[in-house]
Image (cartoon, coloured by chain):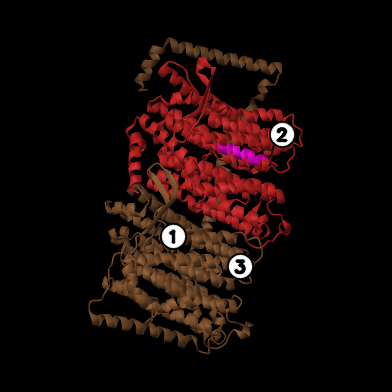
Amino acid sequence: MLDHILSILIFFPMVAGIFGFMVHKDSMRAYGVAVGVIEFSLSLWLWFAFDNNVSGMQFMEHLPLVPAFGINYILGVDGISLFIIILAAFFTMIGIASLPDTKDVKNMIITLLFLQMTMIGVFAALDAIVFYVFWELSLVPMLYIIGAWGGPRRIYASIKFFLYTFTGSLVMLVGMLFMAYFFYQATGTWSFAILDWYRLILPESFQLWLFAAFFVGFAIKVPMFPFHTWLPYAHGQAPTIGSVILAAILLKMGTYAFIRFSLPLFPDASVYFMYPIAIIAIIMIIYTAMVAYAQKDVKQVVAYSSVSHMGVIVLGTFALNVEGISGSVFLMLAHGVVSGALFLLVGVIYERRHTKMMDQFGGLAKVMPRYATIFGLMMMASVGMPLTINFVGEFLSLLGFYQQSHILTLLAGIAIIVGAIYMLAAYKKMFFGEVTIEENRNLPDVNKRELLALIPLAMITIWLGIYPKPVLGPINNSAEAVVQLMHNKATSEEAKLRIPNVSGVVISKTSMKEGH
Amino acid sequence: MEKYLYIALFAPLVSSLFAALFTATPKKQFVGIVASLLIFSAFVASTILLTHVLGGGEIVHVELMTWMETGNLYIPFGFVVDEISITMMMVVTLVSTIVHIYSIGYMDHDTGFNRFFSYLSAFVFSMMILVMSDNFAGLFIGWEGVGLCSWLLIGFWYHKESATWAANEAFIMNRVADLGMLIGIFLVFWNTGTLQYDGAFAAMANLDTETLTWIGIFLFIGAMGKSAQFPLHTWLADAMEGPTPVSALIHAATMVTAGVYLVVRSNELYALIPNVGLFIASLGAFVAIFAATMALVNRDIKRVIAYSTLSQLGYMFAAAGLGAYWVALFHLMAHAFFKALLFLGGGNVMHALSNELDPFKMGGLGKTMKGTMIMMTLASVALAGIFPLAGFFSKDLILEVAFVDHHFIIYTVLLLTAGLTAFYSFRIIALIFHGEDRHTALGFHPHEAYKFMLVAMSPLLILAIIAGFTFKMPYFEMVTQLLPATEYHVHSQVAYWIMTIGTQLFVIASIFFAYKKYMSPSIKVPDGTSKMENSFAYKLLINQYYIPYFYEEYLVKPYRELSTILWEKVDQKIVDATVDGIAGLIHATGENTRDMQSGNLSTMLKWMVAGTIVLLSLAVVFGLSVRYSGEITTILSGLGV
């Protein structure tokens, strides 16, 4: 069974989703939770069986689809994708478990299960076409979730979300086709296998164009400034569960793809575009943080804060060294946990008051102390308090980029200031002061169902903040492999210099440890 | 010995978690007692460690587990008890034990009693991490941890707008400095390859001065935030919104001295870059007098004491910057004792007068609050630096350091500040405890604090009196195992005596002047009409040199406005409008061309004809260009294409 665990992880939710149509709607919630728990247990089993010492792909599966064009169904995980898959399984599970009473709960759960299939597919796929298929398919359930269960402007928001990201993906697809064609020209055989592509060294001019094509697709997904405006609409209109999955997992597809495709395929182009991308990342960090501060709707604050944090992730990725890439992968997980939790928390208050406007609250710390505590914890994680999960990722990302540029890191570091400004301001508006609005006086505190989702997230936030090693170790190994591959493949002088040679470094590291 | 290290470190955490269990329940007296006992056990463990260190035992160094490990980076949770950290541990655990016990009385009627102890103990835990960590990353954990606890405790009464505002201000302003700190840490890592103190400082000896200067500057920026040095000082006075025990513990004795601790800890670095050291010393001297002037006129006893703290921190930085690290640490310790005492005394006064803070509305309280009066007076004497109390030995030493090192400007500034210190300290003493009774008319019925609160304060009183002459030499011998053992002696005996006696006389004169001025029966609650209150100097000082105003008008407001503009104008009107514009363009193209496909036969025939003509002309153009391709190429090449 372990040989096919990735296929099982991908298709079990889908099959379960199809059977879900036959389940009676009263027992649907239990059914969904059961599927979620099984899926999550499987993903934990994957982690258990995962060999931490191997930096390459594991649990590979191979099945020819269109042999003439080298399109194969190839799956595999390494330290970079493993934890995002677990996170996806985890969020679907707690998402279903904590689902409030919505209309059409049955369809919602089926949609979520299909969404889960596409998410895990994206992170497990090692063939560009299979990757692309899952990447695009993931839009459909999300389109439904926003369009069917969203707020008043849900149609506009969902169509905008769909068309915008779809357009970007098409450019990416063209890039993939070109890449395969180059591969064909160089080797004489067609292949869409990413691992095959890794072996191909492209001339720098080709790299630049291909990098740009892939970049459009990824940047819209992340979303990077100035392609981010679909996100506030999507979050603003999506139901809580939609926002949670969108922020926690779907955004990570873009940054994950940078590490999976852009960096190892185009090392010279990555170095070439490092500064422009870093500048975009810094704009993302500061600009969206300021926009977040201006918001009146607490959900929009969290939405814009997501963009701001994604800026740090992108920056860490383009540090092009092990520290930065490990940090950015870790921050993907961290941001998933924390922003997911924040969206859930916003959902909690929305359920009670049917408004997300901050001026409608105030003094909630007195009325809902437990809610205020969990919100406070997640807020502190979001601003990067040490010993919470976010700090590890943020620290490593910035530390990594510092090797490339001092001044840009200093600018990016403003994240820790502006992040504190909008978060503390929002917290103050919602929780501090006197209760002024009569309706807020008797709000019930978080209930058991909500705690079911929030407590595990709070525990992860602290656990991985204090002891990130179980996750950081495998990530580190795979990040080292990526950096080494890039270093070996780099052709230009500058790229060789910018991308460190890891194998030389490993020796000094062991000697350093002996020194302790 | 490791066992005691763990007790000292984790007892506060246990205390915090224990108290946290009861946050949702009404006040429970035992929560405060258990918390105090746990903190006391940390104090006992620290004392045992101190005797170990004093006895010349080995430095206790433990590595609990790995925190972060990736690439070349290796950060463990490592803790060290050496001469520097044990000093801080003693100060922290002692003052926090006293403050915990005191708070049982002070927070007596507060609904957040249990929550308060949870936060307070969490603070102690963070502070212990800060001072015990053996690497910069661990220091940063504590650094941010105390920031968080400070935020929680300043905003403890979260229903008050001013309190939550002050809490956020403190947090954000500290964050500005933390960025500097973070960059300093990055610099250390990329230049030395490690964040462990021993490894990093050893490697620094081989670095060029420019790099070291940058490291020194950035780390000091971090220190400036926590220790509220100019221009990041405004949060400290506003932080007085928190409950008074918090002010005593966090904003006088421990957290604000973290910056000094950092500079002392990095002494090996700063010894290599004396220019940065001189800058630190100059800034310290400036802050000393700058804060002291603001304390002269303020009408809020807690704020006066806060400015006094700021001023004393300036002294510490002056000493540390001049390389007299052990003197800085010694003054840190002595200051912690008498300043905490002063704050707790202030707390008694506040309690007695239902949170009234204006000393002009008090007067004559000495009759009802004898114990508090004696304590605060002695603390002020110690602060003023009168022989033989603690301040004399620590503060006058800093003056000597400046003098011996020939930094006469710094010396003069610090000397003047000593006079101002004595004046403002006794100004509030005189206003609160002496002179006419002004409070009864305002409807206050003061009472002395609980006896156990006074008893809890008494160790601080004893230390404020004896810390100077009993500890100075043993302390010097202990701490100079690790720090440069520079002794500062004025060479000429005569000059020494003139200096010492002169300073003493100057300070005593200031005290008498303060008493004379503020004990007079003509003192009334100022109503803004007197001549002094309308003078320029007074306005400047009472408005804190207009710096908070400047921040509000030129930083906070523009930031807020810019944010709104970025959102409403840039994000919605430019970025998003472009996207919608493109979509609209495509949509409009479709709308406008749909007539072509209307199904009307004559229209479609018209379009068919038009299409045929276009295709034919294209065919002709291409045909011709193929035929004459040779000529076209020549023409084009002739044109230089």
- Looking at the image, the residue that sits furthest to the bottom is B521
- Say if mark 2 contacts mark 3, CB within 8 Å: no
Q: Amino acid at mark 2?
A: Asn
Q: Colour of chain A?
A: red
Q: Position of residue A338 (x, y in %)?
A: 56, 46
In this image, A398 relative to B213: left or right? right
Q: Position of residue A215 (x, y in %)?
A: 48, 33
- Looking at the image, the residue that sits furthest to the left is B492
Chain coloured brown in this rendering: B
As helix, strand or loop, the secondary structure at mark 2 comes to helix
Camera sees residue B554: no
Q: Disc 3 marks which residue?
A: B30
As helix, strand or loop, the secondary structure at mark 1 comes to helix
Instruction: Residue at 70% x, 42% y: name it.
Output: A152
Residue B511 magenta: no
Instruction: Residue at 69% x, 33% y: name it.
Output: A110
- Predominant secondary structure, magenta span: helix
In the drawing, what numbered circle is on residue A107? 2
- Above or below residue A425? Residue A56 is above
- The residue segment tinted magenta is A86-96
Q: Quadrant of the C terminus of chain B?
A: top left
Q: Disc 1 marks which residue?
A: B5
- Say if mark 2 contacts mark 1, CB within 8 Å: no
As helix, strand or loop, the secondary structure at mark 3 comes to helix
- Above or below residue A149? Residue B112 is below
> Which chain does the residue under circle 2 lie in?
A
- For marks 2 and 1, give the one nearer the viewer: 1
Q: Position of residue B85 (x, y in %)?
A: 39, 62
In this image, A178 relative to B496: left or right? right
Local crowd at mark 1 within 10 Å, few (<14), some, or many (≥20)?
Answer: many
